[in-house]
Each structure stands twice: as C-alpha cells, then as structure tokens.
Image (cartoon, grey):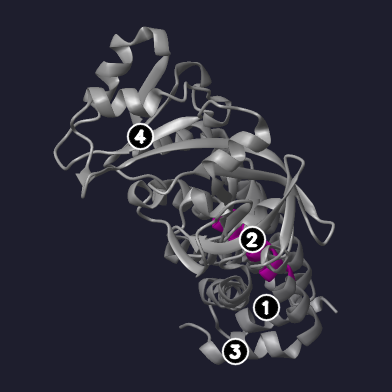
Amino acid sequence: MLLPWEYGVRNLARRPVRTALTLVALSTVVMLVFVVVGFIRGLERSLAESGDREVVLVYSVNSEENIENSSIAARTPTLLTASLDGTVERFGVIHVSPEMYLGTRVSTGQGEGGLGLVRGVTQTAPLVRRSVQLIEGNWPGEGEVMAGRLAAAKLGSQDAALAIGNRITMEGQDWTISGRFVAGGAAYESELWCRLSDLQIATQRQDLSLVAMLMSPGRSPAEASLFCKERTDLELRAIRETDYYASLQQHYKPVRLLAWFVVLLVSGAGVFAGLNMMYGAIAGRTHEIATLQAIGYRRRAILISLIQEGVLLAAAGSLLSGAIAITVLNGMAVRFTMGAFTIRIDSTAILIGCGVGLLLGVLGALPPALKAVRESVAIGLKAV
C-alpha cells in the first residue's frame, strides 16, 4: 500500500523555508540549462536560416571560410556574367550582386560602439538576397547605411542608437541611418549595409570581397566552379551559399560541443546540490520514517513518497524556469564572432530543460531516500 499523494504535498508545505530554498536552487540550475541550450539552438538556427540554395558565392580561394579576408578583382562580376548563362535574368537585369564585406570599428552618436560587420552592395542586392526585407525607412543613398535587426546587438549598443536619422562613424566618415531591415533570422541581420561605391571610397579599395549570383532553377553551381578552375589566374572558388553556411556549422562545432559539456557540468552540479538539500531534508525525518514503517507502510511506499517530494519540487522549479526563459530569455540578442543571433527557447530547449529538471528531482532524492528507509526501525524510533 502506497502513502496518500497528499502526504508528500503536505510535507513540502510543513517546511516552507527549506522547500523554498530547494525550489530556488533547482530553478537556478534549470535556468542555466535553458540559457546554454537556448544559446546552442539560436546559433544553429541562425546558420541554418542563412543562405539560399539557388545562390552561388564566388570569392577568393585564399580566404578559406572567412569571406572578410577575401579580395577579388572588380571585373569579376563582368567576367562571370559573360561566361555563364545559368544566372537569372529578368527585364534585362542580371541577378548578380557584387559585394564588399568587412569588419570595422563602428561608433554611434551616443559614444557607444564596437566591431561591426559592414556590407557594401548595389541595387541588385535585393534580387539576390531574397530574404532581406526593408521594414522601416529607405534603401541607403549616398553617405547612408541601413541597419539589420541585430546590428545594434553586434555593436554592443541599444537599438535606439541605430534609429533612423541617427549618425554613426566608421572608416573615418560619418554615415546616416536610412532604414532598418530583417532577413528571417539569417546572419545578415547583424550587418550594416551601404552603397558599394561609398564603401570603396571610404576604405580606398577598388576590389570586391565576393560576388553572389542567383542561379536559374535546375542549374548547378558546378558551372561556376568549372569557370573558377579554368581561370586559375583569378584565384576564385565557387560554392553554394547553403554549403558555405553548412561549413560554418562545422567550424563552430567545437563551440557547440563545449556548450553541451557545460550543460552536463551544470546538470551534475545540480544533482550534487539536490543530494545535499535532500540529505539535509531527510536527516531530520528519521523518527517520522521509522514511525511510518512501524504502523505498517512498506519501505517501497515510503521511498516512492520521498522521491515524489523531490520530483514535485523539481517539476515546480522546471515550470518556473521555463516560464521565465520563454518570457525573458527567448529572443534575447547575443554577440558572437560571426555577428549576432537570438537565444531560442524552442520545443527542444523546453524538453531538455524540463527533462534535466525532473532528472535532478529523481537523482537528488533517490540516494538519501534509500539511506533513510534502510535505517533500523528501532533506532529510528529512538531518534529525537
């Protein structure tokens, strides 16, 4: 025969201070798990949402995965369009976007700033970067830039610092914010976009970083790769944009593994904290446990009741942490080397966080509960 369900619930209410402290400790551990898992899920989503399967990137073969270090000749877009016929062309406009991409120091008018990512583009960029949507203001004109949704987070500034009409300083020149854009969670959202010619003048460079081409449906990026191999003098490489960001996934794999290791460490610390709290909670109940055995309750029933108390506390802590994570952490911007992304508390993060919380409740309560029920009834009845 098992103990009534209400017995374990009432026991938690009989010791409000100890129960509250245990609940706070468990909630803190689960919250840390939510933060780390949300970080991992946000990074993975940002890289997964970036890229277009029909877009091919052409950049310097010497830059490897870092396009910021790429430098190609300004005539490269003309050579590509003249040699390849698989690029989309509508109303006489070829969907090719020559771009300059670099990291540079950006200062806002509020005295804030940091290392920002700047992309110089032309009027054909929206035809190729189809996920980019202007949500406020206008496309940048001369001496203007438009800011991505997470550009302020990348700079370590407030969103108000990049409001339309405000001025920023980069490459020794002042620029005016003309608009703001989103890109469906892609990496572009942490960038500042300006006119290619303006950026070339500011940096005193006439080269490009890359050329992005929108290929016609059914056309393979192998055509661009073949061109790059034939023109060895240009030292170019071509890769599908989704494959490029997939390579970045592999590049950041050690970071993700380290984050999962942190989850394990935090969970292990939580188990030991739970053990400590439950040992303290059960140590003072020796007389109660012995009395329950004396009146006929089996050790298994008492063990299940003690574990029930731990699971109830862990479930409450998991729900509390989950509610805070969804309302406060979800969507919070995080700076990273590749730009910025948002913490994502999705169904996977909720499942992992709450699963860890419930596991802490079971593992934290089981050893002290086993130790308590194994004590002799006669010795337990004599305990004060």
Instruction: Specify which label sits upstream in the sequence, 3 or 1.
Output: 3
Disc 1 crowd, CA 10 A, few/some/many (<14, 14-19, 20+):
many
Query: Is the C-beta separation of discs 1 and 2 under 8 Å?
Result: no
Whether residue 376 is situated above or below residue 127 in the rendered picture? below
In the rendering, which numbered label is found on residue 289?
A: 1
The residue lying at 59 percent from left, 89 percent from top is 7
Instruction: Specify which label sits upstream in the sequence, 4 or 1.
Output: 4
Answer with the quarter of the image where residue 84 lies. Answer: top left
Residue type at mark 1: give it.
Ile
The residue lying at 69 percent from left, 73 percent from top is 377
> Which residue is tagged 4?
243
Residue 313 image position (x, y, % from top left): 63, 76
> Which residue is tagged 2?
177
Kind of element beneath mark 1: helix
Instruction: Specify which label sits upstream in the sequence, 1 or 2.
Output: 2
- How many discs appear? 4
Q: Which of 380 and 319 is in front in this view?
A: 319
Whether residue 375 can be seen here: no
Q: Give the range drawn in magenta.
A: 25-38
Kind of element beneath mark 4: helix
> Which residue is tagged 3?
7
Tell me, yes or no, whether the highlighted magenta stretch contains residue 351: no
Residue type at mark 2: give it.
Ile
Residue 350 image position (x, y, % from top left): 49, 66
Closer mark to the observer between disc 3 and disc 2:
2
Closer mark to the observer between disc 4 and disc 1:
4
Tell me, yes or no, whether the highlighted magenta stretch contains residue 37: yes
Disc 2 crowd, CA 10 A, few/some/many (<14, 14-19, 20+):
many
Residue 133 image position (x, y, % from top left): 42, 62
Disc 3 crowd, CA 10 A, few/some/many (<14, 14-19, 20+):
few
Kind of element beneath mark 3: helix
